[in-house]
Image (cartoon, helix red, strand yellow):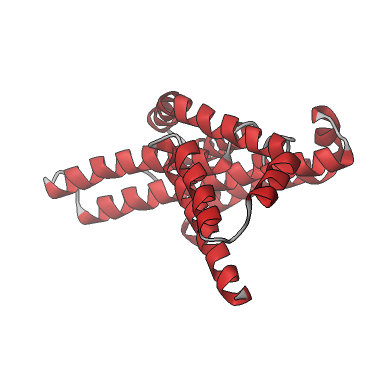
Amino acid sequence: GLETGFILGWIFLLQFIFTLIFSIQCYPLQPGGLIAFQALLMGLTDTYQVFHEIEGNLEVLLLLMFMVSAIFFMKDLLMVIFTKLLKAIKSKIFLSLLFVISAAFLSAFLDALTVTAVLISVTLGFYKIFESNFKKNNISESEFDQGKAFLRDIIMHGVVGTALGGVCTIVGEPQNLLIAQKAEWEFMEFFWRMAPVTMPVLFFGLLSCIVIEKFKIFGYGAPLS
C-alpha cells in the first residue's frame, strides 16, 4: 500500500546515504546502481519513470558522480592537508578557523558529506594515538579526555565549514544546480545572486567559530596538551 511504499522510500534514502558515507573507502557508483535496481525489482517504480528522472536530473547525477569520485581519488591528499594543519598550528582559535575555511572551500567545489568523511578519518587517526598513549599510561585520563574534546571541537568546526561553503556555489550542493538550472543562472551569476545571503552567513559563521573558541562557549575551546 501507500504507507508501505513511503516506509520503503525512506529505507532506500538511508541506504543511499550509507553508500555516500563509505565513499572514502570505495567508489559508490556501483552500490548506488544496485539500489536503483532494487527499487525496480521490488516494484516501487518502473523503467519509464526511472528514465524520466534520469532525463530531468542528468546534470545533477553527473555532478554527484564527479564530486564523489574526485574526493575518493583526492582523499590521501586531503588527509595530508588536514593532518599538516593539526600538527603545524599551535593556536587553537587559528586552527579552528583554518579548519572551517578549508572545509568551506573544499565543499564549495566537492561533496560536503565526503569532505566530512575525510575529517572523520583524520581525527580518528589522532584519537587512536591518544588512546594508545592512554593505554600505555603515557598520558593521564584528564589529558586523554582533553584530547578527545579537542578533536571533537575540530571536527565540528569542519562540519560547519562544509555547510557554509556548500551553499555558495552552483556545484556546492546538488540542489544548487537544480535551482540554477531552473532559473537559467551560470556559475558566477548564481554566486552573485546568492552572495547577499551566503556571504553574511559565511562571515558570521567564521565569527562564531572565533567567539565560541575564545570564550569556551558550549564546551568548545579545549586546548591540546
Q: Position of residue 101 (x, y in %)?
A: 60, 35
Quadrant in the picture for residue 172: top right
| Residue occupying image coordinates x 56% and y 53% | 212
Q: Residue 27 or 119: which is nearer the viewer?
A: 27
Considering the image in quadrants, where does the N terminus appear?
bottom right
Q: Position of residue 189 (x, y in %)?
A: 86, 32
Task: Tell me if I can see residue 203 in this picture.
Answer: no
Considering the image in quadrants, where does the C terminus appear?
top left
Q: Position of residue 91 (x, y in %)?
A: 46, 36
Q: Position of residue 67 (x, y in %)?
A: 58, 32
Judged left or right of residue 163, residue 186 is: right
| Residue occupying image coordinates x 22% and y 55% | 141
Task: Tell me if I can see residue 16 in this picture.
Answer: yes
| Residue occupying image coordinates x 33% and y 43% | 124
Looking at the image, the residue that sits furthest to the left is 136
Judged left or right of residue 220, residue 206 is: right
Judged left or right of residue 21, residue 194 is: right
